[in-house]
Image: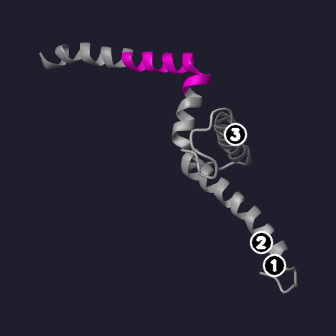
Amino acid sequence: MSNLDLGGKYLARLGKRRWRIEAFFKTVKGRFGLERFAQHSKQGVLRWWCLSGMAFLLCHLQNLDVPVSGPGSWPDWGDLARTVRFSFVPEVRRQALQLELDALDAFQHALPALQT
């Protein structure tokens, strides 16, 4: 709100910029976990903000390389995040899955011993 006479074109341009900012924050909060941070220190908040911003940036760059949707529509940020995760860090993902499989195998082999 303002009591200044700024003109309709200027206010429309300003509103368009503001809408892009709001869309960015909605995406970062909803898809990249910014709404879940429970940091209590300035450094923790800064780290979480940087990680969320980097995740968004990587997905945005992936969308620029290979647009999933047509022009003028919003991309599916979940699909983009999955693509980035699989393409940038496949070895890390493979090791994490292998650790989980090993833990499941150990649990499954321990079951017969627990049942006797």
- Discs 3, 2 touching: Cβ within 8 Å: no
Q: Is mark 1 on a helix, strand or loop?
A: helix
In the picture provided, is 108 more to the left or to the right than 31?
left
In percent of width and height, residue 94 lies at: 49, 17
**Residue span colored magenta:** 86-101
- Give the amino acid at mark 2: Ala
Whole-percent x and y of residue 5?
87, 84
Q: Which mark is residue 8?
A: 1
- Nearer-N-terminus badge (3/2): 2
Give the SS element for disc 2.
helix
Q: Quadrant of the C terminus?
A: top left
Q: Residue sitting at 52 percent across and 37 percent down?
A: 79
**What's the mark number on residue 57?**
3
Lower position in the chain sequence, tag 1 or tag 3? 1
Front residue of this view, candidates 66 and 14: 66
Main SS, magenta region, reads: helix
Q: Tell me which amino acid carries mark 1.
A: Gly
Which corner quadrant of the image does residue 107 belong to? top left
Q: Is residue 115 above or below residue 75?
A: above
Name the residue carrying label 2. Answer: 12
Task: Identify whether 18 is placed above or below 106.
Answer: below
In-image side of 55 versus 42 (left or right): left
Type of the residue with mark 3? Leu
Residue contact at pointers 2 and 1, CB within 8 angstroms: yes
